[in-house]
Image (tube, grey):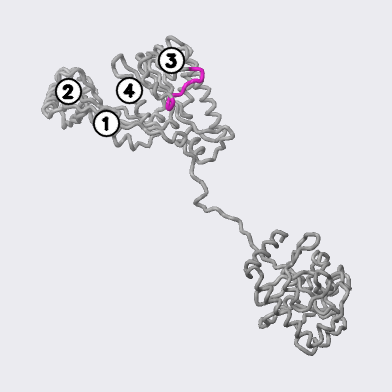
Amino acid sequence: INRNFINKVNEAGNVVVDKSGKVVEILKHKVVLHGRAAGEDGAAEDVPEPAPKPGPKAAAPQPAPSKAAEPAAQKPAPIRVERPSEPVAARKSVPEEDENPFLELTPDGKPVAGETAAEQTPPPAEDGEFIEVDLSRPEGRVVIGRSGLVELERPAVRDAVAAEPAPEEVPEREAAQSDPDAPFTEITVLDDAPAAEPEGVVVTVEANEAKLLDEKAIPTESYDPLKDLVNYRKPPVTLLEDYISDSEVSDEEIFENKTKIEETLKYFGIPIQRIKATVGPTVTLYEIVQAQGIKISKVQGLENDIAQSLKALGIRIIAPIPGKGTIGIEVPNRDKQVVSMYSAVRSLRFQESKAELPVVIGRTIQNENYVFDLAKMPHLLVAGATGQGKSVGLNAIITSLLYRKHPAQLKFVMIDPKMVEFSLYAKIERHFLAKMESEDDAIITDPKKAVYTLNSLCTEMDNRLELCKKAGARNIAEYNEKFTSRRLNPMNGHRYLPYIVVVVDEFADLIMTAREVEGPVMRLAQKARAIGIHLIIATQRPDVKVIT
């Protein structure tokens, strides 16, 4: 309890009692009546003018004789509280002459009788200090009246007593409050002085509790890498063109091919138990079950004969079809249907795929969209002659990833020795393309610069493996899961790792021009899959001279 707290309490008390004006008037009226009553008994008129004493006295076992003592024994007097004799001996530090703490003096040193001191507000001491009193001990002078607690002034030497509160004064406070019926309780001790000036401080106890935050208000959500680019929106499917093909495989064509296959096999001594046709967009699959005792190799040897009878450009025999126990014969349709990327991206299988890097590459013979996970392959080799659709396959892979992944989750490194295949992707440089700081173009067309880029990818691979080693993660999935759950400290160099897909359009031309490409490509193919770097290499010659 400090000076400011006491000032606040005094200000609040003045407001409660209506600026203390009414209380002062009431108290003055009471003091006049009390003084007249005391004058009739001869107690107040005969009080000699005592010399001001240095301070309050401790409780004396017997009060000093005075003229005010005799009338006090005959007529009703304020409640008289005497200290018990047991704890007196324990108080040694207070002088014997100052053992009465109830001596009440006015500021000029004159004693005040009755409630006269109640009119006075507790002024601060001359040194500007306020007295701090614990209510658990009665040395703080508190008077209980009709208006509540009234704070009274202490005598002039209150510093000595306040510095050393006596524990034996506790029973006096209990005795003073033992009479609940009394309208006004006054604590006095008979002494040479006619009455003691009550003095004290009203103490208000305030318990401050620690403020707690609501559990729901504490942020516990995981780190979201997608918030790095909040306004990014995935491209709409309407950007793609939907090809609608009018030509379909007719029932007559299917029945005709079925009859020719049966006749050809029967002519070579291979009886058939049953046959089933599955129509696809470009190829129809005929599944046959041969009679018992017929070897599969005998059917495989009739590939050219069946193609001749069907008048087809070429057929393929799958013997046997995995998981079915039948022999499959693929026959091209006369009128091929166009499989649009629009229908592939809109397919339910692609949109609901849980793969890390989902890719829809087309449709199967069963006319179902074929979706695979590039992260599990983990690298891809696209081989074929000119005009067979290598570049179309690469564009389908890139488009699939662009439609499903966020720029914070995926980056592309495109190497295009042809210079024209990947040029249209230059517009997404700020979002999806990764490049070296020293390069101007994100799409690399110079084989010499491709060597620097691949070497920098090897450096990135080593750095990522070092981060996984510190984090105790075996692959990029475990590492990113730990980072998003805020178990890795970014101050230690940890960061969210996006996938990196390296696409090389013509690897044969690249390795002929810059032989140094071979080293980093081999390193990436062996170690980069665990930390999210995947290679997609297209070439016309998948032989040992190109793919060493």
Q: Earlier in the sequence, mark 4 or mark 3?
A: 4
Which x, y percent locates residue 327? Answer: 23, 28
Crowding at mark 2 (Cα within 10 Å: few <14, some 14-19, many 20+): some
**Contact (Cβ within 8 Å) of mark 3 with mark 1:** no
Pointer 2 residue = 335
Which x, y percent locates residue 87? Answer: 82, 75
Q: Earlier in the sequence, mark 2 or mark 3?
A: 2
Q: Residue furthest bottom?
A: 74
SS of the residue under disc 2: loop
Residue 79 in sight in this render = no
In the rendered image, which quarter is residue 295 located in? top left
The magenta-colored residue range is 430-439
Q: Is residue 435 magenta?
A: yes
What is the C-alpha distance between the residues marked 2 and 4? Answer: 22 Å
Pointer 3 residue = 548
Q: Is residue 283 magenta?
A: no
Q: Amino acid at mark 3?
A: Thr
What is the C-alpha distance between the residues marked 4 and 3? Answer: 23 Å
Residue 146 - label = none
Pointer 4 residue = 393
Quadrant placement of the N terminus: bottom right
Which x, y percent locates residue 212? Answer: 57, 54
Q: Nearer the viewer, mark 1 or mark 2?
A: 1
**Contact (Cβ within 8 Å) of mark 1 with mark 4:** no
Q: Residue at x 32, y 29 (%)?
A: 360
